[in-house]
Each structure stands twice: as C-alpha cells, then as structure tokens.
Image: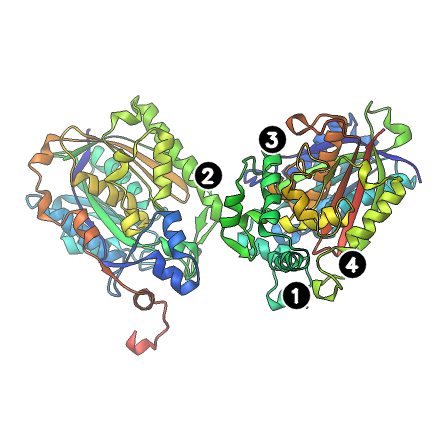
Amino acid sequence: MEVGIVSYGAYVPRYRITPQEIGRVWGSDGEAMSKGLMIYSKSVPSPDEDVITIAVEAARNMMRRVPEIDPKDIGALYTGSESHPYAVKPSGTIVAEAIGCSPNMTVADYEFACKAGTAAIQNCMGLVGAGMVKYAVAIGADTSQGAPGDPLEYSASAGGAAFLIGAKDVIATINHTASFTTDTPDFWRREGQDYPSHGGRFTGEPAYFKHVTSGAKLVFKNMGSQASDYQYAVFHQPNGKFPQRVAKMLGFTDKQIEVGLLTPQIGNTYSGAVPLGLSAVLDVAEPGERIFVVAYGSGAGSDGFDITVTDNIKRFNRLAAPLVSHYVNDRVVIDYATYAKFRGKIRVKEEVA
Amino acid sequence: MRDVAVIGIGDTKFGELWDLSFRDIGIQAGLAAVEDAKLVAEEIDALYVGNMSAGRFIDQEHVAALIADYSGLARDNTPATRIEAAGASGGLALREGYLAVASGMHDIVVVGGAEKMTDVGDVLATEIQSSAADQQWEVVFGATFPALHAMIARRHMHEYGTTREQIAQVAVKNHRHGALNPKAQFQREIELASVLKAPPVAEPLGVFDCAPFSDGAAAVVLCSMEKARRYTDAPIRIAASAQASDTLALHTRQDITSFRATQVAAREAFKRARKEPKDVQLAEVHDNFTISEILAIEDLGFFPKGQGGRATMEGETALGGKLAVNTSGGLKARGDPIGATGVAQIVELVQQLRGTAGKRQVPGAKVGMAQNVGGTGATVVVTILEVV
C-alpha cells in the first residue's frame, strides 16, 4: 500500500541567543564560533516549554490543516526526542490527549539521538502500510542542552514538527525509506547526567558523514536515482556546515538544500531538525516535486527518505497553521542571563522555581 | 661494547586512528619491523616498548606484556619491558634496547613505541600531556605544556631577537615536509600567514605551533653488527646513543632558552661517534612546539645560539638546505603519538640512510641524528645513525 504524509505541523520557540553572546560570557570568540558552525542564533525554549508542549503545538498545527479528519481515526502516536521531560512516563500520552485521539490507540516515545522523529515516521509507515491503523502521528521534538561553556552550547536548541501519516489523500507520497545503522558512540548521555558528552572531532567523519552518505547512497541505489532527480534535499543539520558539506559530497547543490536548512537561524533542534526542514520544504513545494531526506542520529544511524509531492497539496490548507518561516522570523533575542534563567542553569530556592 | 645495527623498521600511519586500538597499532608496527628484518619470532631475545601514559589514555598499564602477548612473543616467554620518560619514552626505549645488544646480553631485540591518544577528549589529553611537567610546582599553578613552551618562546624572542615569523616558519617547513610523507598526520602545506593568524593556544604560540594529538606506533629491530649481515645488506649502524637529564621544572633552570640536557647529550653523542655537526646531513628533532625545534638545532650544535630562527627562515633547515631537519614532517606534521615519536624518528632516519625515503629523500645522506625530549627538556636522548 502506498503511504505518505497527510498533514504536518511545526513549532519553534520564539527566544533566540547568539553565539556572540554565549562567547562573551565564556571568554571565547563567539564570532569565530558563529562563522565556524554557520549558526547565527539558536532557539531557546521559555521556562514553560518542554518537549511535550512543543510536540503538542506541532501536532495541533498539523490537525488544524486537516479539520476534516476525525482524530479518533488516529491509531498510533510516536514522539521521538532525546530530551523527554520524564525519564519514566510517556510524552506521547499528553500529546494524544491534547489532539483528542486517545484512548483507543497506541502510544510510545522514541529515542535515537537526533533521528528519533524520523524513526517514528518509519514506524507509522509500517502500521499504516500494514493496514493496522488508518492514521498514525510521528513527532520529532527536542529541547536539547549543551553543558555551559561546551562547544555544544552554541548549537543545541529547541523545536519540533509532527506528521500525520496515512494512505489516503496524501499531500506527499513516501516512495521509499532506508536506514543505515552501526554502533558508533559519538555522542551520549547516561541516566542522571544533565548534559551529554561527545567525541569531539569523532562526531564528524566516522559518525555523521559516514552514516549520512551511506544512508543516502542506499536510497539512491534502491530507487535508481541521483541528486539531480530531486528539487529539494534535507539533511540532519547539527550546524550549518555539515549539511552543506554532505550535500556537496552527494552531488546536491546549495540551492537544493537552501529551503530545508534552518540551523543557521534556529540552531540544532536535534530530533526536530529534519522534521522541521522537511516541513519548511512542504510549506513551499509544488505537485510533482521530489524531496530527498536523510536524518542522522548519534550512536549512530541514518534514515533516508524519497518523497514526491502530490496534486493534493493544491487543495491542502497550508495556511491554516503558521508556516515554518513564521516561527523562524518571529524572534526575541535574549541575553545569557535570561537564557541561563530560562534553561534552569541558575539554582533557585525550590519554592520560587 | 659491541657495534649495534638497525636491521628492520616498521610504522603505522600517524593520526586519528579511530578504527584501530592500542594493541592493533603496536602489533602493526612491530610486525612490519620484524618482516622488514626477515626474522622469525624465536630469534627475538627481548622487546622494549616506549609508552608515556596508556594508563590514563586507555586505562591500560602493563603494555609491554600486552604487546608481547598479542604479537605472539609471550608464547616464547620473551622478556618485554615498558619504558617511560614522557616524550622521550620512545628514544629511551631505543637506548635500552641498544645497551642490551651492545653489552652482549642480547643479540636481537625489537624496540617499539606506541601511544593511543584520541580515545580521550582534547582537554583531558592536554592534562595528560602536561603531566610530563612538575605537577606540584608547575601544573598545579595552571601551567600547561603549551604554556611552558610559550614562556620559552617569549624568552628566546627577548634574548635573541627571534621573531614570531621565524618561529612560525618551523611549522611551514615541517608541513611542507609532511606533505611528502604518506604516513604523516597532516599532508598539507600551510602558509606563514595561516600560522600567524591561527587562534592562540598560549601566546605567542597558536594552534599551528603545536604538534597534534595522535595515535600511532613505530618499531625497529636492533641486532649486533656481527650478525646483522645475515639479515640485511644495508645495516644502519648506531654510531652513538647518549642520554642526559635536567631539572624537571622549568623555573629551576639558569636559562630557559636552551635545553642543557640536549647540549650535554649531543656533546657526548658526537664524542662517542667521533663526529662533528658538519658531518650530519639530516636530523629528526623534537618539535612538539615550533620553538622547540629552534632550541634543538641550536643546542645540538648545528647553529650558534640565537641563530636557529634566522637559519629556519632562510631555508637552511629545509629539504635541500644545509641540514635537512624533520624530513618526516616532524612531530608537528607527521604527528606526535608520544611514546611512538622517538622510535618514529629512527624509522625516518633509517629510511633516509637506506635511500628509500622517496620524494623527501636527502641525496647522499650518510649520517643522521635524532633528538627526543621528555617534558620541557628534563630527559633528552640523542642518537646518531650512519650508513656502514
């Protein structure tokens, strides 16, 4: 059975902090950091935002675009994140209640570093494709943190997107998906640790580049396609430079990745990164246009997708919810002190916390 | 004392060898050296391994036994000894192997050096590297290895008018040499301007003034000269091996613009080899920082004190110059897997003296010198090799 995207919705917190401001506090060259990472600002969640609120916003935006669909027809909801607010207790149950699709359905939370959201899409494709459910929701969202002063602090940000996967009236058909997975520990956080650890330069060649190119080549091979067959490409974007370099390695042009490259403006939204990039492409894509997607998750693996936009996108009410560009441009720049307060980096008495 | 020859060499590529473990690289280099010497395991009398800090880099001590085990030497119960003298571990392992053969105790020994540095992050790696300095009187007050060398550089600039550009030229030259070495970590040439504008590490030293963190191993086979001809037509003679110590901490020295231990070891080495600086065509010196190479070429007696920077700037130490220094790329471009470095210097010299150094061959090389430094000059080993 052909499956695809029936609707989608995105959300990015409004607050931003610049690398220059982070560098000012830590005595580092923020300007050089900004240039090196190609990140000009990163999103910061406000104190009352977390993965669940972001996932709810994105899922509600997704549902606003398809008012004709009864939420009760959604049989599964999977939320992928590496910053679920609870260690034990699902994020997804709250999201399911918020969009009114519970209780006769299944929910689970996923974790695979930055590709948990696309892993959720694959699972939804399976359930829909097998006829077990009519619709399924896949969400990728994160409120990631780097340790104060760590290079990661310049990029780790917040945001997410939700996809309604179905077999009928799809606005984009998912022609194929393929994954490439190995045990490559480039980035990790153990139970009880506040901040993740990373392998420095090891996160590049043997991790991101090896897995993204291998996943991409699998899709090329299985589909008999090449870079020039696609109008758009979206790659995982831990910074602005990596996706540019990997695109070039695979034969894509800067123009093909331009629309889906959001990290320079909002930072690395981790599980939200590829879902948001794909949402930005769906915001503007025309019928017949083909989208190439490769998500990357540390640990490590990649999920590749080959997607074609259908004629249904013309009837689809994209403007029933804010476009990704709205969230990217709706920004309030804050200083490090406010950022530290928002992110709980300042210890306060519990009564006022 | 008997004459001792190098009859086999082997090494790994230096760099971020993320898919190889400590034992992998140790064995790779060792086997290459043994194969080069056309030996079988039973002929090896002893193994010496230079390693600075496997205990902290990979949580493994007792690495000589490890290498003996995984290279099959434990089967024959061959004695294996680890030698540690920080950056001079490799050079000192060579010296111990040399003494064992020269004394008549052993006929054939394998000397290896290995370090696996990239399993830990940069901050921890710098901390481990800095443990070669005096923990109680230097490191505890915040001195890192780059900082101590920055002080040496500043003083050298002050005393002798050495310029920032002259110091930077060491990196430019060694990268040019490294570009000719397929085993080097950095095989790319760099411009003087890039060195000067690189982010500071400890001023005046920037990123391009510091040798990288590296994984790598190197090994040589030593044999008594009387037996050497059985294995090779081109034995390379160890004409001299000398070692000297100095105070551990920099602040207890009379002068920090020279390494006294280098001067003493060089003087003894030249005396033992019955040679003078002008007899030497090439030298592998311990350029863990650019300034270190300037100190080395002065202290070894190749250039008058204070002239090292000028000589470097004028190309006298480049391939084709008066004395080819660090044709391998040196620690700067070839890489600096600490325990391997002193042995890798010997591997380079042997290649040059055999005339098999390819694009970086020094024409007519007959005598080569290696200078291997531990800490900020507290241990120095100087070795002279020559074509027989």
Residue B138 is tagged as 1
Q: Residue B233 is drawn in which quadrant?
A: top right
Residue pictured at 73% horizontal, 37% vertical: B323
Please tell me whether mark 2 sits on a helix, a strand or a loop.
helix
Q: Residue B367 is drawn in which quadrant?
A: top right
Give the vertical position of B138 relative to B298 (above or below).
below
Q: Are marks 2 and 3 on the same chain?
A: no
The mark closer to the camera, 2 or 1, is: 1
What is the image's colouring? rainbow
Mark 3 in CB contact with mark 1 (< 8 angstroms): no
Mark earlier in primary sequence (1, 4): 1
Residue that label 4 marks: B246
Q: Quadrant of the N terminus of chain B?
A: top right
Residue A243 is tagged as none
Residue that label 3 marks: B182
Please state the horizontal and vertical placement of residue B7, each as a whole percent of the image.
Answer: 80, 30
Mark 4 — on which chain does it sit?
Answer: B
Q: Are marks 3 and 1 on the same chain?
A: yes
Q: Are marks 2 and 4 on the same chain?
A: no
Mark earlier in primary sequence (4, 3): 3
Q: Amino acid at mark 1?
A: Glu
Q: Amino acid at mark 2?
A: Glu
Give how far apart the Cα atoms at labels 2 and 3 are: 20 Å
Give how far apart the Cα atoms at labels 2 and 1 are: 37 Å
Mark earlier in primary sequence (3, 1): 1
Give the vertical position of B333 relative to B379 (above or below).
above
Give B257 or A179, whichever is nearer the viewer: B257
Residue pictured at 79% horizontal, 27% vertical: B39
Give how far apart the Cα atoms at labels 4 and 3 are: 35 Å
Residue that label 2 marks: A205
Give how far apart the Cα atoms at labels 2 and 4 are: 42 Å
Q: Amino acid at mark 3?
A: Pro
